[in-house]
Image (cartoon, rainbow, N blue to C red):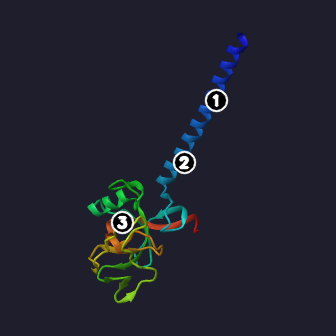
């Protein structure tokens, strides 16, 4: 009888020890995530840019064509639908979405033409095929094209299935968090 009671007590103690270990590791990990996020570090888990650890860097100059940026999309009906479809990840931007990592391919005043691919001022944009259906067979609506308005940027990713300005059009520059810098990444 005493041996059985002792066994129960030992099992409870082992469970408590494991509980405390797991809790400690979890709290430590959460603390690191909060600390790194406060320093501008972000983890990318989408194929639109290499997977891994990135950092948001404040630019010391205006944003230019060719810059890779972190940008919060505006909280619009189109972005809410994109979030519902799973195109956008959960995050801390308006609408509870994660910032996008995209390349600026056109700024204010540039002409955008959308057909089977994207053209900027008449020149084809490499890797810009426009899909009419997403990976689950749902219809995709392409941006109509036009002149990029003042205070906005047209964004692109070379990943074929990327959700970028091909579909949602130019985004306000005030959503740009900073330049995207790779820290430790892997491009499959």
Q: Nearer the viewer, mark 2 or mark 3?
A: 3
Which quadrant of the figure has residue 20?
top right
Whether residues under marks 2 and 1 lie with C-beta atoms below 8 angstroms apart, the answer is: no
| Mark 1 lies on residue | 17
Between the residue at mark 2 and the residue at mark 3, the CA separation in whole angstroms equals 39 Å
| Disc 2, SS | helix
Left or right: 23 as drawn, with respect to 151 = right
Taking the spot 36% from the left edge, 53% from the top edge, the residue there is 96
* Residue 26 in picture, x, y percent from top left: 56, 41
| Mark 3 lies on residue | 138
| Mark 2 lies on residue | 32
Taking the spot 42% from the left edge, 83% from the top edge, the residue there is 125
Residue 186 vertical placement versus 110 (above, below): above
Between the residue at mark 1 and the residue at mark 3, the CA separation in whole angstroms equals 49 Å
Q: Which mark is residue 133?
A: none
Which image quarter is the C terminus in?
A: bottom right
Which quadrant of the figure has residue 51?
bottom right
């Amino acid at each position: 009888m005493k041996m059985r009671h002792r066994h129960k007590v030992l099992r409870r103690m082992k469970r408590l020890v494991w509980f405390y270990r797991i809790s400690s590791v979890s709290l430590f990990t959460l603390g690191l995530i909060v600390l790194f996020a406060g320093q501008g570090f972000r983890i990318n888990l989408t194929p639109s840019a290499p997977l891994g650890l990135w950092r948001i860097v404040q630019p010391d100059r205006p944003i230019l064509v060719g810059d890779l940026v972190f940008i919060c999309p505006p909280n619009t009906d189109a972005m809410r639908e994109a979030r519902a479809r799973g195109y956008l990840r959960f995050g801390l931007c308006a609408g509870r979405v994660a910032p996008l990592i995209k390349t600026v391919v056109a700024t204010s005043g540039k002409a955008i033409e959308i057909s089977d691919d994207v053209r900027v001022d008449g020149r084809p944009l490499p890797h810009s095929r426009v899909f009419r259906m997403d990976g689950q067979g749902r219809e995709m609506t392409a941006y109509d094209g036009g002149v990029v308005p003042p205070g906005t940027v047209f964004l692109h990713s070379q990943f074929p299935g990327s959700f970028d300005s091909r579909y949602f059009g130019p985004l306000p520059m005030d959503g740009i968090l900073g330049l995207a810098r790779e820290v430790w990444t892997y491009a499959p």
